[in-house]
Amino acid sequence: MAETTNAFLFTVLPINHALVLVWVPNKLVHAQMRVCVTSVALDPDVPSQTLTYSLCTNAPAGARVDPVNGVFEWVPDESCLGTNIINITVGDDGKPPLSDTISFAVIVFERPQLMAHLTSTNGLTLTWSSIPGGVYRVQFKSGFDDMEWRDIEPDITATDFMAEAVDVVEWGSARFYRVAVWCNSIARLAARRTVCNSGLTPVQELECHRANFFVVVMRSVSG
């Protein structure tokens, strides 16, 4: 009996493992602050696959994510006050292609609104709308055309949705005030109004999201 030999070619395809997007905490920001979040995808496949990031169709106007590095950027304005849900998806080029999606909220508050109240001892109490955990710096200048703003120390860390600082003002003087968002324990404000979820970006300059307030302290007249 003749023997028959058959040859077979087996092609073993690698298993495409599921990729996972790292959780992103919610962001609390004032309107006109730039939000910057780096999406990080964990993909165990070797060799590395090509990953592509995208925003879901319900993204707010002006929001974008870089398809290559996953960096999400958005500058919300006053029309976006409240909770905005962001959905970011990443997909690979494996067979079959796999994807993962994360969601986080960007909660937008109005820009700080500054108010002032005189006290009975030449004191001026400045109050403004704030974000808990946010760090704010109050500044002043005596003339409208003055170039330099002077700090009122110390910086104020908000513990509620209203914050305050006290300044001592001479009778008969005039001052302009502004309050600037310095940084935030939840969303860090750095140069160019950039908010990074890593918390590692240093604050490089004072970026002013402020309200100006002009105060004239009149000398009291008796009799």
Image (cartoon, rainbow, N blue to C red):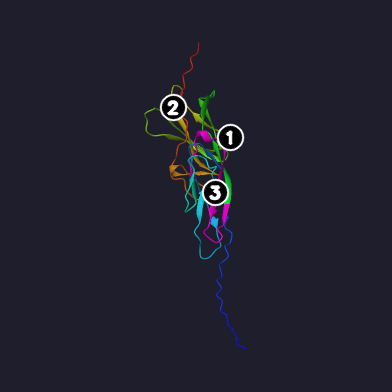
Categorize mark 2 by other alpha carbons within 10 Å: few (<14), some (14-19), many (20+): some
- In the rendered image, residue 13, in percent from the top left (x then y), is placed at 56, 68
Q: Is 161 colored magenta in this rendering?
A: no
> What secondary structure is found at the residue carrying circle 2?
strand
At horizontal 57% and vertical 53% (from top left) the residue drawn is 100
Outermost residue on the front side: it is 1
- In the rendered image, residue 145, in percent from the top left (x then y), is placed at 36, 29
Q: Which residues are magenta?
A: 73-100
Q: Give the Cα distance between marks 3 and 2.
A: 46 Å
Q: Quadrant of the N terminus?
A: bottom right
* Count of residue discs: 3
> What secondary structure is found at the residue carrying circle 1?
loop
Residue 65 visible in this rendered orientation of the protein: yes
First-in-chain label (2 vs 1): 1
Q: Which residue is mark 3?
A: 88
Q: Give the Cα distance between marks 2 and 1.
A: 25 Å
Q: Amino acid at mark 2?
A: Arg
Foreground mark, 2 or 1, reads 1
Foreground mark, 1 or 3, reads 3
Outermost residue on the right side: it is 1
Q: Give the Cα distance between marks 1 and 3.
A: 29 Å
Q: Which residue is mark 2?
A: 175
